[in-house]
Image (spheres, helix red, strand yellow):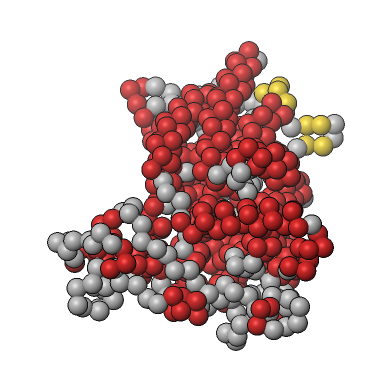
Amino acid sequence: MENGLDDYTQDGTVDLKGKPVLRSKRGGWKACSFVVVYEVFERMAYYGISSNLVVYLTKKLHEGTVRSSNNVTNWVGTIWMTPILGAYVADAHLGRYWTFLAASVIYLLGMSLLTLSVSLPALRPPPCNDANTNNCRKASTMQLAVFFGALYTLAVGTGGTKPNISTIGADQFDDFHPKEKAHKLSFFNWWMFSIFFGTLFANTVLVYIQDNVGWALGYGLPTLGLLISVVIFLAGTPLYRHRLPTGSPFTRMAKVIVAALRKTKVSVPNDPKELYELDLDEYAKGGKFRIDSTPTLRFLNKAAVKTGRTDPWMLCPVTQVEETKQMLRMIPILIATVVPSTMIAQINTLFVKQGTTLDRQIGNFKIPAASLGGFVTLSMLVCVVLYDRFFVSIVRRWTKNPRGITLLQRMGIGIVFHIIIMIVASLIERHRLSVAREHGLVENGGQIPLTIFILLPQFVLMGVADAFLEVAKLEFFYDQAPESMKSLGTSYSTTSLGIGNFFSSFLLSTISDITKKHGHRGWILNNLNASHLDYYYAFLAILNFLNFILFLILIRFYVYKAEVSDSMEVLAEELKGMKLMGPNQVSSHE
């Protein structure tokens, strides 16, 4: 095909100058490769810090179990919450590309300062080998300010990169083109694959360097990797498709809600065609979807009822109303994913702390406790490949769904795995404590003669759960968000993780305080051999079960975005037609 009108993308994507782009020149997997490579290096940087952070806080800054765990989850929670701000800036002002680049500079600044803080002896307290951290000299206010200042500067940077980089990748595929839309179905699976490949390197090589060579090199390498990844991303600039910022999604949603409230007493006509809507051409110009009125959240339809006033805070088009509904409909699903996100927070906190109490020696090699996080990555990688290559193709024959099963069904399976994980973790911890009692290691907190690999099941199962829940969650919030609010939709996924980490801090502190009342010793102490993490994990298993019941109730009332459901049906027919036509006819068709 010549570079005529038909070769331009139909989804409104442009180059950095705002000009329409040719499908043959930009986008597709060729452009995505630069984005994916960036993500591999960036995940190395982030997990190179977060995986072993609880160990640094304990051994170098001399913090106790609850405080060090909560400092990790509070920071990780902030990391996952700031994407809301980044999504707002991208959608309303700078666009995804420029927001990402500006945030990358902040990210690099935070990483550089953090590397400096772990490198200079003056920026940390003197070494202490006492098993009881209460007897060690604590970090000064200045030392804590530099260290946590660097961590939270880094968090602001990730707020701009995280919601936009995955969306930039997804934007490289045209929803109006059957072949590209088919590629997009696998994009999120392989996106998660790239994330966890970077994570695997961090959980193995970087944490080993931090534990055995030095924290300066252990943090310096991911900083250098992040710098290289930004350069790689910039190298792909001539190949990217971009979307122009379409205004603040929060403002557009607020206009609908305010307009509906101001017309509380106005009746909604039975015929949706009587509601206010822009001409189809207005949407076609920008490659946007026009959305028909739906009966769900009917109160908001009042915003589109014509009353003679054209004030945008009094009258909104049907499409704008439906976009607002789509974002609001996803909030209950977001809430149901908070508890599983709280379970994920245990990987880099209590799971790692457990590992430090066990035998980590294999010959002359000592396994870093945080390295078991690599098994989360490995099991997740294997499951994603098996899911994408085998599970989907087999199940699709019965369900006729191009994805095999719906995204909510996939999320539900992941939530069930989280129940199993905490039951398994509780039983393993119960065994660990019994061995500690048998060897008289309860009071002195000594190393238990059990291999660290007894913790392997809970790490492996966490990876399996991620392959179902986390991949589906990211794709669900992206897919179900309106075209003009994709970055905000993606930030729903990270918001779930953020709230989950803050909830983990709340639960850990609350349970620790409650169980110490009335003279009791408490479930969570600095000495894990005298603690009762088995009770705590059992409590989390019950919490997961109750959350699963809530999830089942919520999905019964969830209505999938209309045009996504339709487009998936169209895609299914297109794929079916391609198989019937054969490869030669498909090529000529394209």
Q: Position of residue 585 (x, y in %)?
A: 78, 63
* Residue at the (69%, 71%) spot, across then down: 27
Q: Nearer the viewer, residue 120 or 450?
A: 450
Compared to residue 169, the image places residue 48 above or below, namely: above
Q: Residue furthest left?
A: 265
Can residue 288 be seen?
yes
Residue 459 showing in the rendered view: no
Q: Residue 92: give x, y in percent of width and height.
A: 44, 74
Between 445 and 392, the one lying in front of the other is 392
- Quarter of the figure with residue 513: top left
Q: Residue at x 46, y 51 (%)?
A: 560
Residue 182 in the image, given as x and y percentages of width and height:
66, 58
The quadrant of the rendering that contains the N terminus is bottom right
Q: Residue furthest top?
A: 438
Residue 397 x, y percent position in the rendering: 66, 40
Q: Is residue 362 above or below residue 162?
A: above
Instruction: Please report the residue visible at 55 percent of the width from the left and 25 percent of the height from the top.
Output: 423
For residue 184, above or below residue 72: below
Q: Is residue 107 left or right of residue 190?
A: left
Q: How many marks?
A: 0
